[in-house]
């Protein structure tokens, strides 16, 4: 229509037949362009629905889910560590409080320890040696007049005898040994390790001492640089040498 107006105004060099011919072709051309544009849009839409796009979307969902689970686990671990730290703090506080009460009570005790076997400068054959000695425990004035059964008195007041051994070659660790057996009369006997079964320790001197400590404060196999200060009594220090 616009071309016909221009032609009527004499602004074109076309003939009437050319204008009519062009107007007959123009609607079909417009429809063809619309169809092409429609197909292009349809093609783009179909591409967005292809498995490739769906796969990428699925991978993103999986990644997001994994990250959420990871942070949930991290948060749970944080909560558990916080609770664990709180429990440790409470237990430590109670333990210290019990020890303070224990030693307040222990101020009135009279405890003596002596180690009679082995003797100083003894030569030890093998990696195990026998220990023996006596303990005298008096918790009250009544006990001073009438000696109690020592094994029961120690158990009642939660006192344990623990031997410690240290190789002088290293001069570093004291090793806690198994508690000896205490008899009613206060005598005790047990054994300690002097070196290793494979011969490690031969030719080396070892120190042995027995401590009376709060029951449960030291376990067999514990190693310490310094002897526990939380002891009620200490025997004499004995130095022996392993010869084979």
Image (tube, rainbow, N blue to C red):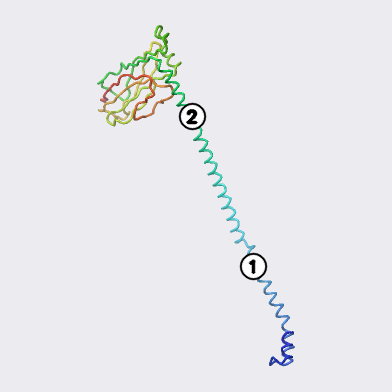
Mark 2: few/some/many CA within 10 Å (<14, 14-19, 20+): few
Q: Nearer the viewer, residue 204 or 74?
A: 74
Of the image marks 2 and 1, the number of the one nearer the N terminus:
1
Give the residue drawn at x 64%, y 67%. 44
- Quickly name the residue at label 1: 44
On the rendered image, what quadrant is the C terminus found in? top left
Which image quadrant for residue 212?
Answer: top left
The image position of residue 155, as x and y in percent, is 44, 16
Question: What is the number of the mark on residue 171?
Answer: none
Give the residue drawn at x 63%, y 63%. 50
The image position of residue 163, as x and y in percent, is 36, 22
Residue 91 as seen in the image, left or right of residue 171 = right
Give the residue drawn at x 26%, y 20%. 120
Q: Are marks 2 and 1 in contact (CB under 8 Å)?
A: no
The image position of residue 72, as x and y in percent, is 56, 45
Tell me the CA gap for discs 2 and 1.
68 Å
Q: Find numbered disc 2 in the image and state the secondary structure of the residue it sits on.
A: helix
- Quickly name the residue at label 2: 91
The image position of residue 183, as x and y in percent, is 40, 13
């Amino acid at each position: 229509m616009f071309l016909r107006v221009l032609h009527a105004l004499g602004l074109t060099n076309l003939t009437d037949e050319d204008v009519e011919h062009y107007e007959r072709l123009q609607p079909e051309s417009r429809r063809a362009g619309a169809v092409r544009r429609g197909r292009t849009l349809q093609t783009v839409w179909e591409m967005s629905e292809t498995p490739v796009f769906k796969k990428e979307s699925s991978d993103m969902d999986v990644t997001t889910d994994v990250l959420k689970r990871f942070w949930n686990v991290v948060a749970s671990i944080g909560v558990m560590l916080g609770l664990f730290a709180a429990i440790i703090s409470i237990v430590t506080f109670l333990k210290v409080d019990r020890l303070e009460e224990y030693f307040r009570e222990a101020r009135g005790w009279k405890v003596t320890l002596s180690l009679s076997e082995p003797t100083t400068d003894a030569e030890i054959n093998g990696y195990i040696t026998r220990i023996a000695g006596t303990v005298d425990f008096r918790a009250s004035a009544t006990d001073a007049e009438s000696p109690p059964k020592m094994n029961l008195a120690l158990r009642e007041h939660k006192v344990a005898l623990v031997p410690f051994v240290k190789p002088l070659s290293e001069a570093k660790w004291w090793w806690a040994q198994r508690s000896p057996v205490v008899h009613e009369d206060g005598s005790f006997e047990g054994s300690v390790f002097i070196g290793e079964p494979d011969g490690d320790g031969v030719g080396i001197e070892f120190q042995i001492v027995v401590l009376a400590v709060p029951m449960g404060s030291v376990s067999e196999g514990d190693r310490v640089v310094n002897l526990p200060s939380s002891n009620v009594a200490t025997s004499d220090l004995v130095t022996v040498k392993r010869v084979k």
